[in-house]
Image (cartoon, grey):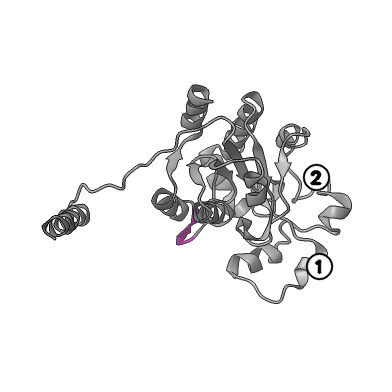
């Protein structure tokens, strides 16, 4: 009983120290890579998010450019091929019949209002229409359409709950994920949350993503707060590339 009392007292003191200290910081668990068990997952590497030609550029463009997001995502795709790391793409897509959904959140309504990720046909009929907003960024196509990269079925809101990204990972024996893509506080963060709930280890690439910035609303800053509190690890692209070279 004394041992239990001492343990509780020690935990209480530790919690008090953490919550009261001005210098208190979150722990940094980190994530080690393992060959055959680590994959790179990219959410929504598509024109509507990442190109000045995309319909959301006025909202996300400043953040994309500040983080060098387009180039950083390409670096991750490139090293995936060089190091034979599984690359999984989780895209966003709306078929014509999806536009008859009867309800949705604020950003869903905003995306439908600007016809983001929409197509005139289903993906299983024609694939992503070439050069439209739902299509891959041109510089990514050689990494995605290489016969090795797995493209999950499209998600319809933000997370992988409604597509087969988790299945694609499980079937490959993956339990460690390097996560990047668009957008930071929506699809990327939602994938992070679901992956963590599913028991994966997740490292988020902080400058391999970006988000909408509106008056009084900074999606990127909000995401980085949550990402730091949720993920096993948060690193820049250059830090990730260095770790890959060392461990894979």
Q: Which residue is at the front of the view, 126 or 72?
A: 126
- Looking at the image, which is closer to me, 206 or 246? 246
- Asked whether residue 51 is drawn in magenta, I would say no
Quarter of the image where the C terminus is located: top right
Which residue is disc 1 drawn over?
A: 97
Q: Residues within 10 Å of mark 1 (few under 14, many from 20)?
A: few
Is residue 78 at least partly visible in the picture? Answer: yes
Is 105 or 227 nearer to us in this picture?
227
User: In the orientation shown, which residue stands out farthest toward the front?
Assistant: 1
Q: Which residue is mark 2?
A: 131
Q: Residue at x 69, y 61 (%)?
A: 156
Tell me if residue 51 can be seen. no
Q: Secondary structure at mark 1?
A: helix
**Among the 4 quarters of the image, the one containing residue 163:** bottom right
The mark that comes first in sequence, 2 or 1, is 1
Counting from the top left corner in percent of width and height, residue 9 is at 14, 58
Which residue is at 61% across, 59% downward? Answer: 158
Magenta-colored span: 215-219
Point out which mark residue 211 bears: none
Residue 217 is inside the magenta segment: yes
Tell me the quadrant of the picture where the N terminus can be found: bottom left
User: Real-space Cα distance between discs 2 and 1?
Assistant: 21 Å
Q: Residue at x 48, y 22 (%)?
A: 246
- Within 10 Å of disc 2 (Cα), the crowding (few <14, some 14-19, many 20+) is few
Q: Residue at x 44, y 38 (%)?
A: 31
Q: Position of residue 165 (x, y in %)?
A: 65, 50
Observer-side mark, 2 or 1, equals 1
Q: Is residue 216 above or below residue 169?
A: below
């Amino acid at each position: 009983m004394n041992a239990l009392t001492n343990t509780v007292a020690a935990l209480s003191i530790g919690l008090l120290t953490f919550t009261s200290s001005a210098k208190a910081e979150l722990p940094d668990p980190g994530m080690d890579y393992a060959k055959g068990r680590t994959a790179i997952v990219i959410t929504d590497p598509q024109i509507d998010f990442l190109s000045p030609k995309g319909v959301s550029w006025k909202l996300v463009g400043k953040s994309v450019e500040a983080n060098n997001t387009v180039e950083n995502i390409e670096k991750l795709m490139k090293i995936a091929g060089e190091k034979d790391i599984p690359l999984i793409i989780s895209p966003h897509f709306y078929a014509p019949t999806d536009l008859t959904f009867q309800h949705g959140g604020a950003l869903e309504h905003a995306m439908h209002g600007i016809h983001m990720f929409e197509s005139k046909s289903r993906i299983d009929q024609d694939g992503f229409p070439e050069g439209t907003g739902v299509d891959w960024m041109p510089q990514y196509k050689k990494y995605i359409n290489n016969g090795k990269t797995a493209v999950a079925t499209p998600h319809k809101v933000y997370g992988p709950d409604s597509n087969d990204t988790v299945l694609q990972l499980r079937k490959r024996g993956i339990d460690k994920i390097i996560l990047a893509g668009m957008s930071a506080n929506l699809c990327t963060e939602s994938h992070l949350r679901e992956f963590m709930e599913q028991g994966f280890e997740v490292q988020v690439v902080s400058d391999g993503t970006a988000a909408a910035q509106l008056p009084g609303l900074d999606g990127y800053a909000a995401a980085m707060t949550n990402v730091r509190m949720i993920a096993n690890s948060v690193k820049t692209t250059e830090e990730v590339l260095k770790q890959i070279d060392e461990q894979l």
